[in-house]
Image (cartoon, rainbow, N blue to C red):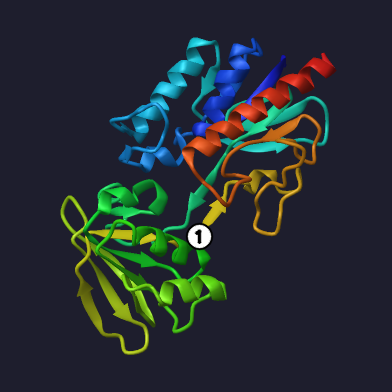
Amino acid sequence: MSVRNVIILGSGPAGLTAAIYTARADLKPLVIAGRQAGGQLMLTSEVENFPGFPEGIMGPELMDRMRRQAERFGAEFIDEDATSVDFHHRPLIVRTEGDEFAAKAVIIATGASALWLNLPNEARLMGRGVSACATCDGFFFRDKDVAVVGGGDTAMEEALFLTKFASSVTVIHRRRELRASKIMQDRALNHPKIRFIWDTVVRDVLGTDHVEGVLIENVKTGETSKLPVQGLFVAIGHAPNTAIFRGQIDLDEKGYIRVRDGSRTSVEGVFVAGDVEDYRYRQAVTAAGAGCRAAMDAEVYLEGVA
């Protein structure tokens, strides 16, 4: 088995930027892209906040362009999921369902996945009014009525951000009390555009080709009703895609990879970029920047072990 210079796990903005930079450095990276390549931007309709696209660009198209750019410089792609790793020995090992690969360095860019409500029509209406990112999609809901599901800081941040565009924001929470910090609660509770529906869950999203409302149920009375909104923002959290790294690398209490000194991890030669370690910003542009940083750190590392 030949030992590669660098293997990149993930093919969202972080992984693809890392691929571009390592390929241009003549490191001949292998990208384990995953069966659902492209990251969360593949679920995004139009991206208007990525620099260089004044008219906006569809999320899948942006990912396709970044991938073709990496391939142009010599990056190799395998559209399979990584199933396990071995970071306890040298060379570093990455396994897929059908093969095993060895490398001197690994860049982890597996991202994080939004937690969804698993409603009957939720997936069908993603990008058509259903979203998990107000910063990404809030602009499209100017002068519209929207709903936010959740009761933590993320939900309050999403709701407050949406007030810049939406006519009204309705926060739907299954309990009577919020889990958000006191300061975030006060800001949301006192905002004139935000109202709350307590003790309530969303049972489905309504609409044919775009969101026209949500079906809600009071958990105490069992009463159901329809709430007319044009957007539903699910803000119940994210889960980092780090299951295969448990026991191999240091993770924090939420499962995110601990980063130190730029993009380095607890394992020498293993670097990290994007939402798999960044639970605060979660933007395509910050992930891309992190991918650049990880690639440059890996290049310096490889120069020292050559």
Residue 236 position within the rendered picture, expressed as x and y whole percent measured from the top left? 47, 63
Label 1 sits on residue: 237
Question: Going 82% across and 36% down the picture, which residue do you hit?
Answer: 88
Q: Is residue 9 in view?
A: no
Residue 9 found in image quarter: top right
Residue 148 position within the rendered picture, expressed as x and y whole percent measured from the top left? 36, 65
Residue 141 position within the rendered picture, expressed as x and y whole percent measured from the top left? 26, 54
Judged from this view, the residue extending furthest toward the left is 208
Quarter of the picture holding the C terminus: top right
- Give, as a three-letter code, the residue at label 1: Gly
Q: Secondary structure at mark 1?
A: loop
Q: Is residue 33 in view?
A: yes
Left or right of 3, for residue 289: left
Rendered view: 207 above or below 14: below
Mark 1 crowd level (few <14, some 14–19, many ≥20, 10 Å Cα): some
Residue 254 position within the rendered picture, expressed as x and y whole percent measured from the top left? 65, 58
